[in-house]
Amino acid sequence: MGILDRFLRTARFSGGVHPDDHKRPAADAPLRVMPPPARLYVPLVQHIGSPARAVVAVGDHVRKGQRIGEPQGAVSAAIHAPTSGRVIAIGDIVAPHPSGLPVRGITIESDGRDEWCELEACDDPFALDPAEIGRRVARAGVVGLGGAAFPSAVKLSGGLGARVELLIINASECEPFLSCDDRLMRDRAAEAVDGIAIMLHATGAREARIGIEDNKPEAIAVMRAAVAGHARIRVEVIPTRYPMGSEKHLILVLTGREVPAEGRPSDIGVVVHNVGTAVAVRNAVRFGRPLVSRLVTVNGACVREPGNVEVPIGTLAGEVLAFCGGLRVDHGGPARLLLGGPMTGMQVPTLEVPVIKGTGGILVLDAAEVGEGDGGPCIRCGDCMRACPVGLLPLEIAARVRVGEVDKAAGFGLADCIACGCCAYVCPSRIPLVQYFHHAKGELAARTRGTQRNETIRTLTRAKAERLEREERDKAEALARRAAASLAAAAAAKQSAPVTEKVAEDANEESGVCA
Amino acid sequence: MLAAILSLTILGAVLGTVLGFANRFFQVEGNPLVEEIEALMPGSNCGQCGFPGCAGAAAAIAAGQASPACCPPGGRSLAVTIAQRLGVSVDLGGADDPGPLVAEIDESICIGCTRCIRACPTDAILGGPKQIHNVMRDSCSGCAQCIDQCPTEAMVMQPLPVTLQQWFWPKPALRG
Amino acid sequence: MNEYLLLLLSTALINNVVLVKFLGLCPTMGVSKSVDAALGMGLATTFVITLAAAASWMLEHWLLAPFDLGFLRILSFILVIAAAVQFTEMAIRKTSPALYESLGIYLPLITTNCAVLGVALLNVQQGYGFVKSVLFGFGSALGFTIVLLIFAGLRERLALAGVPAAFSGAPAAFITISLLSLAFMGFSGLIPA
């Protein structure tokens, strides 16, 4: 297909930015596999949804791939031991999160043997029922590896309800610095395509399109070669533009259709999976191997040997960095530690946080790369408005959040903000716009929680008041009944006094009954 | 002179009659605003606001004698809801808001007397005679009525711990 | 017809009751913190002014002029205006308790809004007929509402701006409304003399 043809066919989204991608040389360095460290810290919630429940006890010996966390609820994911060893603690570990708050997790001391538990392999996944594939993926604890970590089985087995026509594989990797998907496609193209074929079978979609940004020519070439034998899988080259990897924008560019606000891709018959998830699905279905490791890009000016590393889940970020030659302390030293990409990633306060299923990158940036200024006053230049890929007015929203008018900010479409960071990237005053939006969303969520709490409490108060009233009434009735009975007995036996006293005593005892 | 007196009297009488009929036509039963606000309040009648029960507080808020933020168990969300309803702005006291307080029991001191259980308006305390009690945080309204009941001072009010799911970025510090 | 339109335009914009004649400044400063309240206040005042203009014309031409009671003019006009305000207050309280609360003390204060009495007295001064009186009242009220809405919108924006502490609040509002007044002077060229 000609370049002009492609240009005409490709839909575009307004806004977005084109940051310097910083992907090379890390993307070109060969993939390294990191051996399990002495201790692994595995959080029980690494996904969107309810946390898993620990099913091992301290002192238990576990083997690699053994289930140690049971999913709870409809949207949840199982957790598996990333290596063989002994459980030495179940309790709080520092969460890979900007707050630095604790999260419940299992600490495993490696025995160095790294031996797998027994796995349930399958020679021909295409003979399996789609629902069975969903179950196997769920058992393997596979979540979206693009960063959001939504349990994949829910999306695969039609848990979202609507019929899926098109499977989109997100391999755009639009975030600067990150190259783990690029590396994965270059080294494991055949596995990825096999995984996509299994996903096609599981979702019942008619075709799959792999969206790859045009700044990854090697990956495009390898993937094109790998899909040669598959009629229903196509590689689509899409222009390099951040945030191309955002689900809604990728769908718009690949299909020309827009996902409604507050809607899901499944509303228009599309489901989007990350290319890394495809490999994880293949491993889960073909070999029964749960998700116990992932590719992580280690990058940034402060990393001595930047590159892509396959890291066991639960390895501390500091140990991954040590594996990559440690940190450089010249030209100012590390200024910021990030998990994920520089645009949407999480700034973490310490290196002592574990790599989890959604961690695509560990970045240690120096001051020049952070490029953070003071955050001056807004000059109303409107650059953020032009950069916003969702078509919002970041300056207006931020101005309202700044003076505490969160509701008015919500009126400007705060709920549609995808926190991509384009506005903050282009802001000449270097205003931390995204932090304003995160704060406002959190504040709104807190208010909703507060309202729900008040409602619960109102219901409980009313219930208790009603119960007390009922008890009072019952007691009065019982008293009256017994008085009547004793009167009748007195009339019969002509001796009423002792019985009445007995009734009064009973009543006293009853008033001591508690909830 | 007579004309002036007469005309003003007639004018007053006519206008008064019109207003009198209007008043009957636009009669408002009770104060719907007070009832509406009362329906929003926790209803535990804890008295921390300084008014006799939630109904009293609702009347005071509607009359503008109390701030919409006067209800500690209701917290920020209630203050904002009421302020929106009234169309007034409310000072939320900014960053030093510790969030909702809930009761907590020091289990090493609790003697299992069940007094706090009887005082609790939301049945948020679990336990029986001679057994250690426990507070269910989700149900505790933070009314603090149990605090004075405890003979061993085992009950304290504590801010709700912030969990990972509830934490959110603080507002960026102001510059310019 | 043309004459009436011109009257409406000139009272609403060119001889604006707030920014050119400087009447009714109290509610303009008081109820301009939010556009919603400003709209409610504007509508209430429009109702009162129009009603008062009509009632005062009748009063003047059927009572005061025939019986030569000109000295009772202000007294009787205030009486009528107060009644109209009471009526509006009851109606708002019944239909929109929230608006009633947010207008607060400014609702009964429409009585002493000098724009209302001013319009009634100006009507007599100009010797307008009934239709013209009502139009004059309605046009003035329209101008009042427009200014109130514009000013409330400006103040809502102003609340978001980083105003220096010494100027925040009333000072910035006064500067804003004086600039707005200057802007409204521009309308004086709208109708050629």
Image (cartoon, coloured by chain):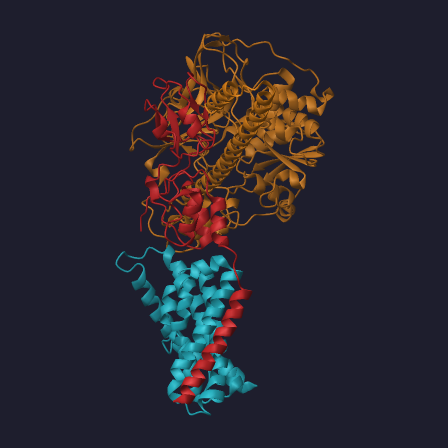
Chain colours: A orange, B red, C cyan
Q: Is residue C15 visible?
A: no
What x and y, as percent, mark residue A336? 35, 33
Q: How many dots with numbers? A: 0
Depicted A114 relative to depicted B168: above or below:
above
What x and y, as percent, mark residue B107? 37, 19
- Quarter of the figure that contains the N terminus of chain B: bottom left
Left or right of A192, for residue A375: left
A32 vs A200, nearest the viewer: A200
Depicted A137 relative to depicted C41: above or below:
above
A462 vs A510, nearest the viewer: A510
Q: Is residue A380 visible?
A: yes
Residue at the left extreme?
A: C166
A193 vs C172, nearest the viewer: C172
Residue at the front extreme?
A: A494
What x and y, as percent, mark residue A263? 60, 42
Left or right of A234, for residue A174: left
A410 vs C64, nearest the viewer: C64
What x and y, as percent, mark residue A410? 48, 48
